[in-house]
Image (tube, rainbow, N blue to C red):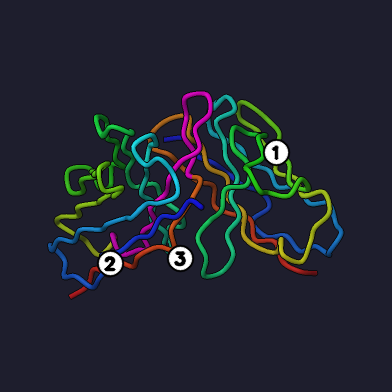
Amino acid sequence: EVQVLESGGDLVQPGGSLRLSCAASGFTFSGYTMKWFRQTPGRGLEWVSSITPRGDKTYYADSVKGRFTISRDNSNNRLYLQMNSLRAEDTALYFCTSTQCSGGKCYPAYWGQGTLVTVSS
Amino acid sequence: DIQLTQSPSFLSASVGDRVTITCRASQGISRYLGWFQQKPGKAPELLIYAAFTLQSGVPSRFSGSGSGTEFTLTISSLQPEDFATYYCQQVNDFPLTFGGGTKVEIK
């Protein structure tokens, strides 16, 4: 059974940093693109970042570019999101997803339960 | 950025009804569209990808169609467990974007 489990969410002050982690199991982690999304009641679902199977290509939403870094450890089946210079608008429930790819495009197929990041003083 | 507009944003229906949700893209995205179901307090679940391919384990009462800029999600006979919010998402180009959602409630 495919499972992804996020952790690392916390209350952090504006300007602070946080590292989210996602533990994957039940599939060949090193063979799949992975993604981070976030969700808030006000802005809905937002894509944050994606990383290719070998980690050689990364992509970011403009709102997090230069502040967030996605990475992966294929030897330990883990995905990470390093979040720096956090802002109040980064407050959200963050989801890690594995993917289902078709026609060269990858869809977020399996989602974790989410980890809550709150940025507030 | 590619904007996705879902309609309706709210839908009231009865068990057994046929339900159709539309998603319109601001520019052509070929068939690179997915549909998701989300229940309160839960993560989204992928129902359909590539516009019409049913994700493994998803009941056959769900179907998708469309290409280019107009897409539909159809539930052929609404079941009690289908009352939820549905989202479309395009993966044609970065940034990946979602529609605003359609909440399906019991009439």
Q: Residue furthest bottom?
A: A121
Q: Which residue is mark 3?
A: A41
B39 to B102, vertically: above or below: below
Marks 3 and 2, the one that precedes in the sequence: 2
B79 to A49, vertically: above or below: below
Chain bearing tag 1 is B
Main secondary structure along the magenta-highlighted residues: strand
Residue A9's tag is 2
**x and y percentages locating residue B4 in the rendered image:** 54, 41
Chain bearing tag 2 is A
B56 to B78, vertically: above or below: above
Total number of numbered discs in the rendering: 3
Label 2 CA crowd tier, 10 Å (few <14, some 14–19, many 20+): some
Q: Alpha carbon of mark 1 to alpha carbon of mark 2: how far?
A: 35 Å
Instruction: Please name whichever residue, A85 or A32, is drawn nearer the observer in this view of the structure.
Output: A32
Seen at 70% across and 44% down, the residue is B73
Q: Secondary structure at mark 2?
A: loop
Q: Do pointers 3 and 1 mark residues of a single chain?
A: no
Q: Secondary structure at mark 1?
A: strand
Chain bearing tag 3 is A
Seen at 23% across and 68% down, the residue is A119
Q: Alpha carbon of mark 3 to alpha carbon of mark 2: how far?
A: 17 Å
**x and y percentages locating residue A83 in the rendered image:** 20, 55
Q: Quadrant of residue A9?
A: bottom left
Q: Secondary structure at mark 3?
A: loop
Residue interval drawn in magenta: A90-108
Q: Which residue is mark 1?
A: B64
Label 3 CA crowd tier, 10 Å (few <14, some 14–19, many 20+): few
Q: For the residue marked with disc 2, what is the amino acid?
A: Gly
